[in-house]
Amino acid sequence: MSTVRSDIPSRPAPAHSFRAMRIADLPAVMDIEQRAYEFCWTEGIFRDCLAVGYRSHVILLDGKVAGYGVVSAAAGEAHILNLCVDPHQRRRGLGRALLNHLIEDARAASATVLLLEVRPSNAAGIALYEQLGFKRIGMRKDYYPAKGGREDAIMLEREIS
C-alpha cells in the first residue's frame, strides 16, 4: 500500500459503484498502480490473479476505474493482496468504501478472517485498517522492496464471521 499524505484535507465521498475486475480494466489498473507505487505489480501479476480466480474488484467513479482490490480466499481465510485508490482520488472515502466492500465479499466467500500486510511507513493505511477493526498480529522482516534495501511489513488480521 502506498503512503497517503495526512495533511491533505478530506473531500466528500463521491458516488461510486463496484464490480468484478476484468482484463479490459488492466490498462486503467496499471496506470493507477504505476502512479501509486514505486515498486508496483506487473500487468502479468494482475492477469495471473484474474486467471486463478482471485476475488478482484474495481471501484468506479463516473464509469471509470478509481481503485481496485485483489483478495485470495480459501479454507475460511481471505488475504488482501493489493488495495489501491488512484492518488488523484484519495481523501474522499474511496479506500474505506473499497475496503468495506472487500470485507463483505470475503464474508460472502465464507471467510471468517481477513489478513493483509502493510508498510510501517503507510501511516494513513494503518490508521484506516485499524479504524475498521484490523489488529496487528506480527511482522514480516524485509517483506517489501524499498529504496536502498527492504522494508518490513506489519501483518494485520480482522475476524469477519
Image (tube, helix red, strand yellow):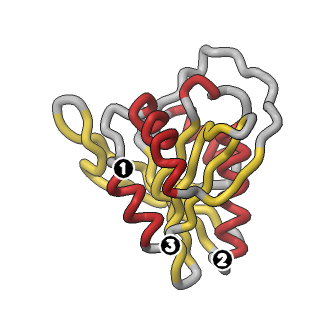
Q: Do the residues labelled 3 and 1 touch (CB within 8 Å)?
A: no
Residue placed under numbered mark 3 in the picture: 53
Residue 49 placement: quadrant: bottom left
**SS of the residue at dot 3?**
loop
* Amino acid type of the residue tagged 1 in the rendering: Glu
**SS of the residue at dot 1?**
helix
Quadrant of image for the C terminus: bottom right
33 vs 80, nearest the viewer: 33
**Which residue is at 43% across, 73% downward?**
52
How far apart marks 3 and 1 lie (CA) works out to: 16 Å
- 129 displayed left or right of 152: right
Residue placed under numbered mark 1 in the picture: 43
How far apart marks 1 and 2 lie (CA) works out to: 25 Å
**Which residue is at 44% across, 53% downward?**
117
Q: Nearer the viewer, mark 2 or mark 3?
A: 3
- 48 displayed left or right of 110: left
Q: What x and y, as percent, mark residue 154?
A: 43, 50
Q: Which mark is residue 160?
A: none
Identify the mark nearer the N-term, 2 or 3. 3
- 118 displayed left or right of 158: left
5 vs 108, nearest the viewer: 108
* Amino acid type of the residue tagged 2 in the rendering: Ala
Residue placed under numbered mark 2 in the picture: 109
